């Protein structure tokens, strides 16, 4: 019998809301730990990039 997690879905892309909607449509039992870990890594990288952009924007608007 083939493992249902062997056919993992494509990585989640798009906005946070789009990713959440796509994730909610997937059957939890069909998602491997490797796939879930990759999604978490991708989300954390995107979050860090957004935080860096916000920090740069804040510094550019600071009154000296």
Image (spheres, helix red, strand yellow):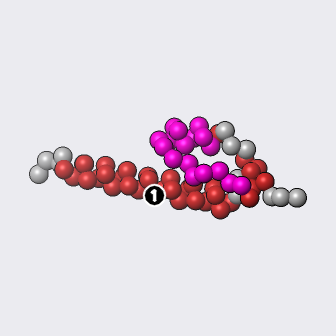
Say which residue appears at 11% left-offset and 51% top-offset: 64
Q: Magenta span covers which residues?
A: 7-23
In which quadrant will I find the N terminus? bottom right
Q: Residue furthest bottom?
A: 34
Q: Is residue 15 left or right of residue 3?
A: left
Question: Horizontally, is 5 left or right of 21 in the view?
Answer: right
Which residue is nearer to you in this view: 30 or 45?
Answer: 30
Residue 19 part of the magenta segment: yes
Label 1 packing within 10 angstroms: few (<14), some (14-19), many (20+) = few
Location of residue 63 in the rendering, given as x and y in whole percent from the top left corner? 13, 47
Residue that extends furthest to the right in the rendered view of this protein: 1
At x 26% / y 53%, what residue is drawn? 56
Residue 40: where, in percent of width, then height?
56, 56
The residue shown at (68%, 60%) is 33
- Secondary element under disc 1, as helix, strand or loop, is helix
Residue 5: x and y, percent? 74, 56
Q: Which residue matches tag 1?
A: 45
Please tell me which residue is depicted at 44% across the width and 53% down the height of the picture.
46
């Amino acid at each position: 019998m083939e493992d249902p997690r062997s056919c993992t879905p494509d990585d989640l892309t798009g906005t946070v809301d789009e990713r959440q909607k796509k994730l909610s449509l997937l059957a939890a039992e069909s998602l491997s730990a490797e796939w879930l870990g990759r999604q978490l890594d991708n989300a954390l990288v995107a979050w860090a990039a957004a935080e860096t952009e916000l920090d740069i924007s804040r510094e550019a608007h600071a009154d000296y």
